Image (cartoon, rainbow, N blue to C red):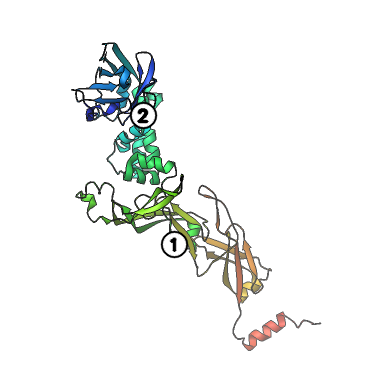
């Protein structure tokens, strides 16, 4: 008998377009509707023309009441277990007869027109030869390796290699983006496409104030920070007994966009909270903060998509705000200059000196007063190029600010008679006006 269903082994026919009898293109929709440029079959919504298929590969087309039943069969079947089975579709042809008069039928593959069908079949991790849930760094590593292998410069005009190269590029574009990867892990390509259309809300950003000593803002530093955040347990709704799902519990409600009628014929998109079917847990994650030379107080380091996860939302960013802590010896001015103070004995203030002081990173800064140059109390000495690094966009630094050193002259607390007489002879009384 004629089946009214599409057997699972014939799912490859769903969403395909074929050139029929060298005449016109026809379409096999995924919902079993058959579309052709004839009076009865050109309007899919009318549902007058339908198709079905059995496990033996025979395809039945009810071409409206006038043309009646058509039966065709593929000359061979693609391997649906092969991730690249769609590459075989152009090599498949259909042939058969029209039931009422035995008229011969044949069709050649044109394309898969239904992108949703393609998306539903995609296994992005499989495209890169990875297990589901592989992290971003593993994704990027696999992409680099496979892109070299299948690059057109190596494979020439091989259509299979070209298709493979395209697929791994698409997989990397999604799985190397934390937000898209999260949505793909939750709901496949359907969720990714919804995000691209703006149909999925974005979660709130997380904020952390991170104290950094002035010394590390001068030298730069790699800081390893552990955070604890809520994550969605991928795949645990379907298989809660998996090892990775231990410790997973209830998730917060999901926020979904729904249409609400606000008047006759008028609808608006509104957010609505609904109970989540996913499972969540708190998880420790280690992050590396790159404290660049010359970073400013209040500057931010952003980790995209690393805020707390919630089903049905794009994770927000985790933002670390630099809080410069006080230093016992140095203060920062105008972003790039440093100020400090040092004590000079009275003798050196009068006779000159050549001394050094330790900078923030331990290197020595030379302070010099030539003989005959008197250092005044609280005099400020400018040392060019010994201030803070000028951080430039993209990393590194281009220049340094200046260091200003205040000279605190240390006077003796008392003088002996001999010292007073010597000073009196050296410095005779000056006339005052």
- The residue that label 1 is drawn on is 210
| Residue 6, picture quadrant | top left
Element type at mark 2: helix
Residue 343's x, y, as percent? 57, 73
- Residue at the (32%, 16%) spot, across then down: 107
The number of numbered badges drawn on the structure is 2
Q: Nearer the viewer, residue 351 or 162?
A: 162
Alpha carbon separation for disc pair 1 and 2? 63 Å
| Residue 19, picture quadrant | top left
Residue farthest bottom in this picture: 417
- Residue at the (40%, 40%) spot, across then down: 193
**Mark in the foreground, 1 or 2:** 2
Q: Which corner quadrant holds the C terminus?
A: bottom right
Is 32 displayed left or right of 364 in the figure? left
Return the disc, 1 or 2, that comes first in the chain's sequence.
2
Q: Which corner quadrant holds the N terminus?
A: top left
Q: Which mark is residue 84?
A: none
- The residue that label 2 is drawn on is 46
């Amino acid at each position: 008998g004629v089946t009214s269903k599409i057997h699972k082994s014939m799912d490859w026919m769903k969403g395909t377009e074929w050139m029929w009898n060298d005449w016109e293109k026809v379409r096999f929709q995924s919902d079993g509707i058959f579309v052709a440029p004839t009076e009865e079959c050109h309007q899919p919504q009318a549902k007058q023309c339908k198709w079905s298929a059995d496990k033996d590969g025979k395809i039945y087309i009810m071409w409206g009441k006038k043309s009646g039943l058509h039966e065709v069969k593929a000359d061979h079947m693609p391997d649906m277990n092969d991730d690249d089975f769609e590459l075989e579709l152009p090599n498949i042809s259909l042939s058969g007869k029209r039931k009422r008069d035995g008229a011969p039928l044949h069709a050649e593959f044109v394309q898969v027109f239904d992108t949703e069908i393609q998306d539903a079949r995609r296994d992005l991790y499989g495209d890169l030869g990875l297990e589901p849930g592989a992290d971003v760094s593993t994704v990027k590593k696999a992409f680099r390796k496979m892109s070299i292998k299948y690059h057109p410069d190596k494979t020439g005009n091989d259509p299979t290699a070209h298709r493979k190269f395209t697929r791994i590029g698409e997989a990397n574009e999604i799985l190397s983006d934390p937000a898209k990867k999260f949505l793909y892990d939750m709901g496949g390509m359907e969720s990714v496409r919804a995000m691209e259309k703006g149909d999925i809300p974005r979660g709130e950003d997380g904020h952390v104030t991170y104290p950094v000593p002035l010394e590390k803002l001068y030298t730069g530093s790699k800081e390893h920070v552990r955070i604890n955040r809520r994550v969605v347990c991928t795949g645990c709704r379907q298989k809660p007994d998996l090892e990775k799902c231990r410790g997973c519990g209830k998730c917060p409600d999901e926020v979904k966009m729904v249409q609400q009628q606000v008047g006759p014929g008028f609808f608006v998109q509104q957010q609505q909270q609904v109970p989540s079917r996913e499972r969540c847990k708190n998880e420790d994650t280690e992050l590396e903060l790159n404290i660049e030379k010359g970073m400013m107080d209040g500057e931010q380091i952003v980790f995209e998509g690393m805020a707390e996860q919630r089903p049905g939302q794009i994770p927000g960013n985790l933002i670390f705000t630099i809080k410069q802590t006080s230093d016992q010896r140095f203060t920062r001015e105008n972003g790039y200059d440093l100020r400090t103070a040092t004590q000079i004995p009275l003798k050196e203030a009068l006779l000159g000196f050549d001394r050094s002081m330790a900078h923030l990173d331990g290197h020595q800064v030379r302070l010099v007063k030539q003989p005959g140059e008197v250092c005044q109390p609280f005099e400020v000495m400018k040392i060019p190029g010994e201030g803070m690094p000028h951080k430039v966009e993209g990393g590194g630094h281009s220049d340094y600010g200046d260091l200003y050193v205040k000279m605190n002259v240390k006077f003796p607390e008392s003088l002996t008679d001999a010292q007073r007489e010597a000073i009196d002879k050296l410095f005779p009384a000056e006339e005052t006006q």
